[in-house]
Image (cartoon, rainbow, N blue to C red):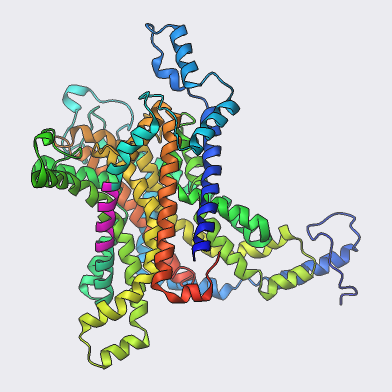
Amino acid sequence: MAAFLVRRILQSLVLVWIVLTITFFLLHLAPGDPMARYDHPDMSRETVMRMRGQLGLDRPVIEQYFIWAAGFARGDFGVSFRYNRPVGEILAETIPNTLRLTVASMALYVVFGLVLGMMSAARRYSVFDRVNTIVALFVYSIPSFWLALMLILLFSLKLGVLPSSHMQSLDSASLSGIPLFLDRARHLVLPAFVLGVASAAGLARYMRGSMIDVLREDYIRTARAKGLPERSVLLKHAFRNAAIPVVTILGMSLPFLLGGAVIVEKIFSWPGMGGLMVEAIYTRDYPVVLAVNFVVAVMVILGNLLADAAYAALDPRIMAGGKDR
Amino acid sequence: MTPSRRPMPAAQGTPGGPAAPGLTEVFRRMEGTLQQPCRTCWSGGWARFRRNRTGMAGAFIVAALYLMAVFAPALTPYDPVSHGSLPEMRHRAPGGDHPLGTDKFGRDVFARVLYGSRISLTISFLSVTISVIVGALAGAAAGYAGGWVDAVIMRFVDALMAIPRLFLLLTCVALFSSSIPLVIILLGATSWMATARLVRGQILSLRRQDFVVAAESLGAGGRRIIFRHLIPNTLTVMIISATLRIGGIILTEASLSFLGLGVPQPVPSWGRMVFEGREALLGAWWVSTFPGLAIIITVIGYNLLGDGLKESFDPVNFG
């Protein structure tokens, strides 16, 4: 198991490295200049050239690559062109914000997805199941940015019950303890809902299918025949086995959530990596683009590894059968 | 009937090859009998599809959308791009001459949504075509060749899948100034990985089957086996997965346009229209709302159609 994990991690890191190298050369060879935004009559050519020199942009691309790569290997992500600060520092500020949003969404995603899927399967072809299927199809097809705007329109602008942007109120510096927590929680509701519940529709459909398969098994009939209440048949016997294949979906949904976070963070002015990425793209802040891609790729790989490990832990047949790709 | 059983050097017609032309023709015909087009499965599938209510509803929605896109000029007298006279035309509420209202430039929202469907439908259709072709080629190469070719291609697929598509797209969009062909190519180039996995899996199971083994023993080369025997047999799976994927592509295109990195101005694109409406969300909710509804209806249409095709033609591979 340990050897398997180590090999997977090493393989994945090599892959990420290759992808980042390709990205580096694409970014540097493509048209567009990070210095373009200093293009201003007041700015003398000498100053711009000096800044280029400081940022290392005057060197050949190959040399820039090795400087960047050597720094990267030591954990130094370079200096942001735009903020003139180490990228590592900027990431240290933004990653926790994105994680807060992603973890909250993930929780909503899992709870809504599993519970709705299970309830649909338990009452298959009932009115509830049909309504659930139709609503899921609808939600599944909603663009997240549109849903976000509609919720802002309803809850922030019309009803005025929830804040429409940022992570906390402007006067939050004066708060502490429980009021601060509540303030932050209120700001989290809409973005986490948009990101989590909207994606839960797909998970619910998957869970429903998995649960229906399990409910056909003999041991479920046995459990019912020996007079167990339906509730415990569903929760204790069926749910556990139905959830196993769903774990893989959970691992794969992480890129989806992180990608969705780009949009959601932009709409809700959430100071996370998504917003940082979009800004960096607009301003051609290459070190930031590369570092964000790296962090996101590592998060996704870790998520997949966790899912694989959980899968193996939940289903002993996998390791016994020697699952090896 | 066949005097010699030695493998043919190349089945795709090298003129003046060592084998007599008559012999090539015989092999061709023998090979032709190996791949049975299975008419019964197809007609059975269509019969099932016609009885499939969700699938037919999806087909109806998609067909209606294409008709509306084609006949947009006949359905609205307004121009989607040129500005109206601002003071009196700006942000008119829905009703009367403007069933869905007007935007901040006094343009008719209904006309813009109609013309926007051309952009969404074209981009999504072409992108999914690119993604299916690239995915099929990569998957077929990986599945048929095996060994290190398979390892390299599939690890590359894994790597691309490890970076969320939107991040990948944003990185690529940064390189060039955005244009419609660029958006089509990028969307196609970043969504072929799932098809590659699917096709590879199909090919791995197909290539052990008798008709492929027989074609190989008749001397058909790798390229011929892939294009004549393997890919045609994965077409159903590819078409279904493409239909199911097209909704996601529409959503991604809309997201890109919403971020201002997709279709350039002033082309009416649904994602951009939602973005433009957000400045006046409270006063003029219709500017953002209706393009969003158009996106939802389109995506639902394709998803229903894909589900229907899946249930009718290939319930096995798609669980």
Residue drawn at x 38%, y 34% is: A88
Query: Is residue B68 depicted above or below A77 in this figure?
Result: below
Query: Is residue B219 depicted above or below B75 in this figure?
Result: below
Q: Quadrant of the C terminus of chain A?
A: bottom right
- Looking at this view, is B15 or B186 the one in front? B186
- Judge left or right: residue A162 versus residue B235: left
- Judge left or right: residue B38 versus residue A32: right
Residue drawn at x 20%, y 86% is: A229
Query: Is residue A97 depicted above or below A213 in this figure?
Result: above
> Is residue A108 found inside the magenta-colored segment of the image?
yes
- Looking at this view, is A55 or A120 the one in front? A55
Residue drawn at x 23%, y 81% is: A232
Query: Quarter of the image holding residue B210?
Result: bottom right
Look at the image and tell me whether residue B75 can be seen: no
What kind of secondary structure does the magenta stretch mostly adopt?
helix
- Judge left or right: residue A264 versus residue A26: left
Image coordinates of residue A152 in percent, x first then y, are 17, 43
Q: What range of the chain is rendered magenta?
A: A100-111
- Looking at this view, is B45 or A152 the one in front? A152
Q: Number of numbered discs present?
A: 0
Query: Quarter of the image holding residue B305?
Result: bottom left
